[in-house]
Amino acid sequence: MNDPVASLLAALSRPGPGSSDFDLNPGTVLPEGRKLRPAGVLVPVTLAQGAPRVILTKRSSALKHHPGQIAFPGGKQDEGDADVIAAALREAHEEIGLPRDLPQVLGTLPAHETVTSFMVTPVVAVIEHGFDIRPEPGEVEEVFTVPLSHLMAPGNYSVQSRRWRGQRRHYYTVPWGPYYIWGATARMLRGLAARMQDE
């Protein structure tokens, strides 16, 4: 990846459908009239460590929802947020101490619908300088990075399944070392990887 910024910009400019937690489960029947809450997550690509790497978090095991899972920094859009991009930047500042003016936002991917009734917009940004990572103790157990090249290689993804609420649910995984990246996070990354392959 000679110019990661140019490659990401090209990928983001390509048209394509959104994604959902139900992509690999075509038999899922979604309730009519369901209300989806807007949310934004940051896909922070740091260029400060040489080869580009994506910053991810491991959620606190004490959390009620998705304890211990790997996730992007981000969360639901609050009333004070101008849009989902602002929500993603605010949450990244709160969760990992990322200064709001440090990321250079390149654009967004199509929204991803989650099983928890959120419509999540992935906001792709590059970070050219290092910063003092400060995990929010109540929410984030660990902050780590994964090479962008690993996440952009479709061959590193596999489809796994487990039983959930009485049904077998399939989902993407893209493991890295001790980190089991799966579910919505892996699905959004897989969508970006597909766009990167179109170069």
Image: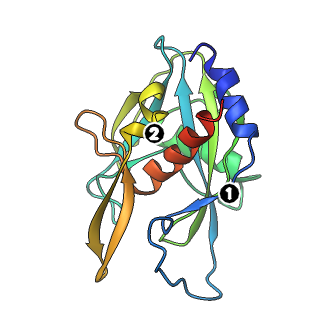
Classify mark 2: helix, strand or loop. Answer: helix
Q: Which residue is mark 2?
A: 154
How far apart are the two marked residues, 2 and 1, measured between alpha carbons? 18 Å
Q: Report the residue at 40% width, 42% height from top.
A: 136
Q: Is residue 195 above or below residue 126?
A: below
Classify mark 1: helix, strand or loop. Answer: loop
Locate residue 72 relative to residue 86 in the image: left or right: left
Mark 2 or 1 closer to N-term?
A: 1
Where does the N terminus fall, quadrant-wise? top right
Q: Which picture quadrant has residue 144? A: top left
Question: Residue 98 versus residue 22: which sits nearer the camera?
Answer: 22
Where does the C terminus fall, quadrant-wise? top right
Q: Amino acid at mark 1?
A: Pro
Q: Is there a contact, CB below 8 Å, between mark 2 and mark 1?
A: no
Image position, residue 179 (x, y; %): 28, 40
Q: Is residue 179 above or below residue 75?
A: above
Residue 65 seen from this side:
no
Q: Which residue is mark 1?
A: 17
Residue 183, numbered label? none
Image position, residue 91 (x, y; %): 56, 46
